[in-house]
Image (spheres, rainbow, N blue to C red):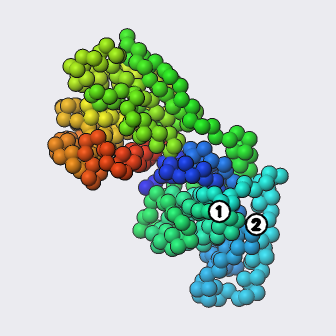
Amino acid sequence: MLFTDRVDAGQRLAGALGHLREARPVVLGLPRGGVPVAFQVARALGAPLDVIVVRKLGVPYHRELGFGAIGEGGVRIISDDIVHRGRVSEKDVASVERAEAAELSRQARRFRADRPRVGIEGRTAIVVDDGIATGATAAAACEVVRAQGAARVVLAVPVAPPDAVSWLRTRADEVVCLSTPRSFSAVGEWYRDFSQTPDEEVVALLARSAADPPEAVRSVDVEAEAGRVRLSGELALPQDTAPVVMFAHGSGSSRHSPRNRAVAKALNAAGLGTLLFDLLTEPEAADRRNVFDIAVLADRLSGATRWLRTRTPWPIGYFGASTGAAAALWAASSAGPEVAAVVSRGGRPDLAGSRLPGVHAPTLLIVGGRDTTVLDLNRQAESALRCECRLAVVPGATHLFEEPGALEEVSALARDWFTVHLAPRKG
């Protein structure tokens, strides 16, 4: 997995942390590069942001090789193996540690200015960095926040080698890592832009977060225009710059569908906007023939997409359920890059027929393992689609995903797919 920059990495990482939103966490960024990533996570989760200052202890003649790390509160981690193999004397250890302790105090004062440290006692603390090499610094950070009274410590990073992640699982209560490539030499190789983060950027992001705390999800009633028809809907935006997922409901359903609203809530928690709206007017929906007219439903979805495009420059995705999934795929086949990702829940892609090969947006097909007829239809569709495609089967689930935990699994799959594929790209 290659990240555009730290903003992109933070937005993707936020999607994998949406399950922690209800825990009211505190997000702690490791300076310097971890803070821009943590800023995006904090905004998406509606959480306060602070910095966790630790300093790597480098071998005197090879500073990039760390033999340990220190953190606030007197936390000290030393790798005796590296000290021994690097022939680092006790005098050198003490000298490096004194210098880094002084720098640690300077950074903490500079980054926070005169603001107090955000309280984490009894709370979930999410420690964020832009990547991990050896893991010594991240381990020190986890020890620091635990010593400061955090009830739960979660370490979250975009990329790290597998062995480091395995080791760090013994230091944190949970480790969330988006990519664990086996061939790993440096964090920077997994970013297109890995330019240095200056102190000034860290200070500015922390000050911005303190002065402008993230708002709760803002939900407004709208009327989406689709040609001559105005379609009632609800637009929810957790932030002004969020990608938006448009929902296409199945037959007999509407924007009030509890299942789709549950998925939308999970997407909002991950920092994504949602538009729940009806593809048919009330009189139209009363005629059952209309709910299976996929061409009309797709045309309405396309019209509403053009309406939404006039209100946001950010990426747009489609989430379709049952017959709504067919409409989403049909509309996506003619949308080109206008639609960046599609997710189908218990969908009927067969109703999109010959339109399937024209879909270019990455598509995720989610089907219940016990929904055998629809599962076969989706397997056929997977073969017909020419885009990036994945079929995800939720074991034991039926068509409506009413079984315990089934809808939560759908939400998590959709969240992760949209988080990755709707992340804004720089030109």
Residue at image position (70%, 65%) is: 148
Q: Position of residue 242 (x, y in %)?
A: 53, 36
Looking at the image, residue 353 sits to the left or right of residue 150; the answer is left
Q: Residues within 10 Å of mark 1 (few under 14, many from 20)?
A: many
Image check: 419 left or right of 103?
left
- Numbered badge on residue 168: none
Q: Which residue in the protein does label 1 denote?
A: 150
- Circle 2 residue: 104
- Looking at the image, is 359 positioned above or below residue 180? above
Question: Which amino acid type corresponds to the residue marked 1 in the rendered image?
Answer: Ala
Can residue 422 be seen from the camera position used here? no
Secondary element type, mark 1: loop
Mark 2 surroundings within 10 Å by alpha-carbon count, few (fewer than 14), some (14 through 19), many (20 or more):
some
Residue flagged by tag 2: what amino acid is it? Leu
Q: In x, y percent, where is residue 263?
A: 41, 40
Question: Is residue 91 visible in the rendered structure shown here?
Answer: yes
